[in-house]
């Protein structure tokens, strides 16, 4: 197999908390704590987990929008752990390769910029063609995402949520990236529009051979798009596998609980819901041993003492649980 | 668009303040056409200290100059000082506040420290100190007031930047390869102009008051150039024998400042989404 497009090794993002007055100990929020994954060209990795598990932070730090505390990032074998340290031209080139689509279509577009400006300026920054070529490209992009050229002079508040999300996608596409990170790209939209956006993303992936990292809290959404899925809990990846394996033979108790929460469209089918008790522990003081031990239905003594490592459980299937 | 008109209609402050401000601006621009006499050259000691009447609508001063004409010409000094110095303050405040909020770290601490020092010194004292240092005169007033009142703009700008820079479109701009300067001036600044504009309008009013005070103390505009503060200063001796010499320039200051403050308040009410209570 060829080299992966993006390789993330032992990524850590710790946010320092304000030090308490007269206290010497510095405390951190362990938002992302030692995760590794890779994405191949044209492939989709889904990252799922409940809110606060660090999945968004992981996505943002891949783009260097949040500075990693530790670990390394490689894009086509080039170290991109700190883009700001690279020469300016190199950094610009990398920026061009990786783009992001945000969750909230209402805060992801500058309200004071017209659609044309939103799409044109990034291409200008990257010296992509003459004014005429750029405006042809804008027309092409708009058509791709189902908008019309006469929309170009309008401002974001004149569009609906679904349209805005499509503008966000057009903006991400404008630089011809090879990797797009979708940070809950559909969770703020109506269900009918969710399907529309997901289909659009899939079509575009096929056409441009895009790699996606789709971050979501909803396994049902990821099921449609992802080739591989990583399940995160409290800043760590607890299970990673092909999407089929995750759905047919989940090994980690947390993944099993998540899957049991997906509604089944058959009222007669008996569902085996695994209900987790309690809340996610604070990422400031993660529990000792396995981070899931406070809520795990299969908990034994060893879970409180020893932190499980991510081990191989099958072809491309990794899980971090003592009993899997 | 209709919504904006409706909002403006519901703001008597904005309308009244706007009209007053517009009249003062018109007065300053059209002074030579409006003033019945020349403010300096038409001095006639034969008619000094005339009370208001049909020949001299606001009376004459101790040198027999028409007070109405001097008040009209005085608006030029007051307005130009108010506007020019506030533009200077706004530029200083925006640059410092924007960079402090955006870059943070030691630069933020430094700028905020400086701002707090500026806020703790009364602006009158600070302006007086600069005037004492560089000497009296109109040009020096511009300079002194232009670097006195930026602290409010700076604070407001910084706090708005802190909120705005965490929004997704700023992150997106960064991911798209926008440089820091471009992000600050095209992504952040256009979205925080509202509060800066309000502070600016109110700042013009306080600059006019400061200039009047400096001129009253003899450090600002020098005679015979007509300025409202300077007119008040020379009229002090005749306060009881010829009160009109001081009343009219005083009234001019009062009305102009009131107009600008009403205008600023009204602007804040329509630009601030949190204060829509009055609109039905």
Image: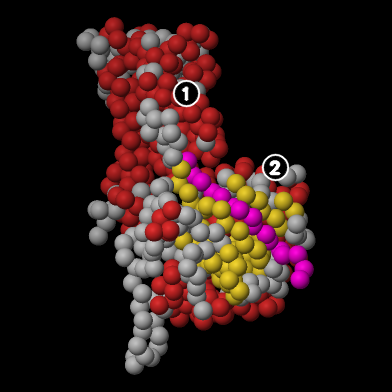
Is residue A307 visible in this depiction of the protein? yes
Query: SS for tag 1?
Result: helix
Up-down relation of residue A55 to residue B226 (above or below): below
Q: Residue at position x 69%, y 68% from top?
A: A40
Residues in magenta, as a range: A1-16
- Magenta highlight: main SS: strand
Chain under disc 1: B
Label 2: few (<14), some or many (≥20) within 10 Å?
A: few
Is residue B214 visible in this depiction of the protein? no
Q: Residue at label 2?
A: A85
Task: Name the foreground residue: B141 vs A315.
Answer: A315
Label 1: few (<14), some or many (≥20) within 10 Å?
A: few
Up-down relation of residue B114 to residue B157 (above or below): above
Image quadrant assignment for residue B235: top left
Q: Is residue A9 magenta?
A: yes
Q: Residue at label 1?
A: B114
Find residue B56 and report its horizontal and vertical position in percent: 32, 22
Image quadrant assignment for residue A191: bottom left
Q: Residue furthest front?
A: A301
Find residue B151 and report its horizontal and vertical position in percent: 44, 28
Task: Give the image's coloring scheme.
Answer: secondary structure
């Amino acid at each position: 197999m060829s080299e992966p497009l993006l390789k993330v090794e032992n990524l850590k993002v710790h946010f320092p908390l304000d030090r308490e007055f007269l206290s010497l100990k510095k405390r951190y929020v362990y938002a992302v704590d030692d995760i590794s994954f890779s994405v191949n060209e044209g492939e989709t990795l889904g990252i799922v987990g409940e809110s606060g598990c660090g999945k968004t932070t992981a996505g943002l730090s891949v783009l260097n929008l949040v500075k990693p505390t530790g670990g390394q990032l490689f894009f086509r074998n080039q170290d991109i752990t700190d883009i700001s340290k690279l020469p300016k031209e190199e950094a610009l080139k990398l920026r061009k390769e990786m783009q992001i689509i945000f969750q909230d279509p209402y805060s992801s577009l500058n309200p004071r910029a017209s659609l044309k400006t939103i799409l044109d300026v990034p291409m200008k920054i990257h010296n992509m063609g003459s004014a005429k070529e750029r405006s042809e490209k804008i027309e092409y992009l708009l058509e791709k995402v189902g908008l019309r050229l006469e929309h170009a002079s309008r401002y974001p508040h004149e569009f609906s949520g679904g349209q805005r999300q499509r503008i966000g996608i057009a903006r991400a596409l404008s630089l011809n990236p090879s990797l797009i990170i979708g940070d809950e790209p559909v969770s703020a939209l109506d269900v009918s529009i969710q399907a529309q956006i997901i289909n659009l993303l899939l079509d575009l992936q096929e056409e441009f051979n895009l790699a996606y990292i789709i971050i979501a809290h909803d396994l049902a959404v990821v099921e449609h798009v992802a080739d591989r899925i990583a399940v995160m809990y409290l800043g760590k990846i607890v299970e990673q596998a092909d999407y089929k394996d995750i759905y047919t033979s989940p090994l980690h108790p947390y993944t099993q609980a998540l899957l049991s929460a997906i509604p089944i469209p058959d009222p007669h089918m008996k569902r085996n819901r695994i209900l987790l008790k309690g809340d996610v522990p604070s990422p400031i003081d993660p529990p000792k041993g396995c981070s899931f031990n406070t809520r795990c239905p299969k908990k034994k003594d060893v879970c409180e003492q020893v932190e499980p490592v991510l081990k191989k459980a099958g072809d491309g299937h990794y899980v971090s649980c003592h009993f899997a | 668009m209709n919504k904006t008109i409706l909002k403006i209609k519901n703001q008597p402050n904005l309308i009244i303040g706007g009209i007053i401000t517009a009249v003062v601006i018109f007065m300053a621009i059209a002074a030579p056409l409006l003033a019945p006499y020349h403010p300096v050259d038409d001095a006639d000691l034969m008619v000094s200290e005339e009370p208001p009447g049909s020949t001299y609508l606001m009376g004459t001063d101790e040198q027999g100059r028409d007070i109405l004409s001097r008040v009209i010409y005085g608006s030029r000094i007051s307005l130009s000082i108010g506007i020019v110095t506030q533009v200077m303050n706004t530029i200083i405040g925006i640059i410092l506040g924007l960079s402090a909020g955006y870059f943070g770290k030691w630069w933020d601490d430094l700028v905020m420290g400086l701002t707090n020092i500026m806020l703790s010194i009364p602006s009158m004292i600070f302006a007086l100190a600069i005037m004492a240092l560089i000497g009296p005169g109109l040009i020096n007033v511009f300079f002194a007031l232009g670097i006195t009142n930026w602290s409010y703009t700076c604070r407001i700008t910084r706090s708005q930047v802190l909120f705005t820079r965490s929004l997704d479109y700023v992150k997106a701009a960064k991911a798209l390869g926008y440089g820091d300067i471009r992000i600050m001036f095209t992504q952040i600044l256009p979205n925080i102009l509202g509060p800066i504009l309000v502070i600016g309008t109110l700042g013009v009013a306080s600059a006019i008051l400061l200039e009047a005070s400096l001129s009253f103390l003899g450090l600002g505009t020098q005679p015979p150039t007509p300025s409202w503060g300077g007119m008040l200063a020379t009229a002090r001796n005749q306060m009881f024998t010829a009160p009109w010499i001081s009343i009219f320039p005083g009234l001019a200051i009062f009305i102009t400042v009131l107009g600008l403050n009403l205008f600023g308040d009204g602007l804040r009410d329509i630009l601030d989404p949190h204060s829509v209570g009055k609109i039905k």
